[in-house]
Image: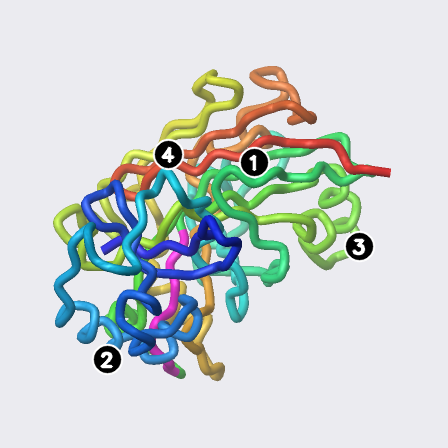
Amino acid sequence: MKFVTFEKPDGTFRAGWLLDQEYAVDMYEASSGILPSNLLDFLENSESNLEKVVSFSFTKEQKGVYPLSELRLKAPLPFPRSFRDFYAFEQHVKQARENRGLGMIPEWYEIPVFYFSNHLAIKGPGEAIVKPEACNWLDYELEIACVIGKEGRNISANQADEHIFGYCILNDWSARDLQRKEMKVGLGPAKGKDFSTSIGPWIVTKDELEPFRAGKGFNLSMKATVNGRLLSEGNMKDIFYSFGEMIERASAGVTLIPGEIIGSGTVGSGCILELGDQVHRWLKPGDRVKLEIDHLGVLQNEIIAEER
């Protein structure tokens, strides 16, 4: 199933799932209030709520079912409980460090590392991304994210799949010049990632990806284009640390709760920092960035200037 959050013609915001790829079900309206109106509440009891969804049989003629053409898709999880972003693709780490004259550090192979980003700055498909006024090196990052759907603490890697609700595309927008300066102090990234992260266009439940499982990930082609020009190509199966290993690390001594997002980090070749600005300049207002991952859809955003 593909879960979405959307704005209806009357201006209300609701959540539900896709029906026949051309319609969306307002799960609250269609279930007469049995299911919640937003995805965060749905995730609080995701297992029992999914059972209820399966028990319903909806057609496009029923109440609460709308053509996608009448709706405006938003971030599928507009206000996640938290957002941790990992650093799980070896090719990206190696190349990005090499571009700065640095070698790999042994510790990267010992533990999957992450940072917390701004979970209150989530954007959805088609939403504008405001370039921070002080930023001159704006970058995209092609990633995949998982959404936690079951509470757990000290979760082992081989049990982590029980706690995953689904997956979506993630663009971890980065102000590289701000990030570079602040990380010299020994902390971060922080302000360089503070302004925006986009996800969507929907969250695909984990069962849909099982047929594509390969290595520590899934055989999913990942691409990024800027203004129609293909810049990044990778595959999720090349990931060094599995989402299970990431969840094991994140939940060590910590309780993960439904509605938290965990990002994979950038796939190899998945950003300008790694490619080099001789391949493509840093992003500027007017640029359109499109990320595409097999079976997860397309996520596109346009850069705009900060209003004064």
- Disc with the residue nearer the chain's start (1 vs 2): 2
Q: Is residue 248 above or below residue 189?
A: below
Point out the frontmost of discs 3 and 2. Answer: 2
Q: Main secondary structure of the magenta part?
A: strand
C-alpha gap between disc 3 and disc 4: 35 Å
Label 2's element?
helix
- Disc with the residue nearer the chain's start (4 vs 1): 1
Q: Residue at x 63, y 21 (%)?
A: 277
C-alpha gap between disc 3 and disc 2: 47 Å
Residue identified by numbered label 2: 48
Residue identified by numbered label 3: 185
Could you tell me which quadrant the N terminus lies in? bottom left
Q: Is residue 302 above or below residue 86?
A: above
User: Which amino acid type is shown beneath numbered disc 3?
Assistant: Val
Q: Is residue 107 visible?
A: no
- Disc with the residue nearer the chain's start (1 vs 3): 1
What is the crowding at mark 3: few (fewer than 14 residues within 10 Å), some, or many (at least 20)? few
Asked if the residue at tag 4 contacts the one at tag 3, i.e. Cβ–Cβ closer than 8 Å, the answer is: no
- Disc with the residue nearer the chain's start (3 vs 4): 3
Point out the frontmost of discs 4 and 1. Answer: 4
**Which labelled disc corresponds to residue 91?**
none
Is 182 on the left-hand or right-hand side of 63?
A: right
Q: Is residue 203 above or below residue 160?
A: above
Point out the frontmost of discs 1 and 3. Answer: 1
What is the crowding at mark 4: few (fewer than 14 residues within 10 Å), some, or many (at least 20)? many
Residue identified by numbered label 1: 140
Label 4's element?
strand
User: Which amino acid type is shown beneath numbered disc 2?
Assistant: Ser
Q: Position of residue 25 (x, y in %)?
A: 29, 57
Relative depth, front residue between 254 and 109: 254
Q: Which residues are magenta?
A: 145-152
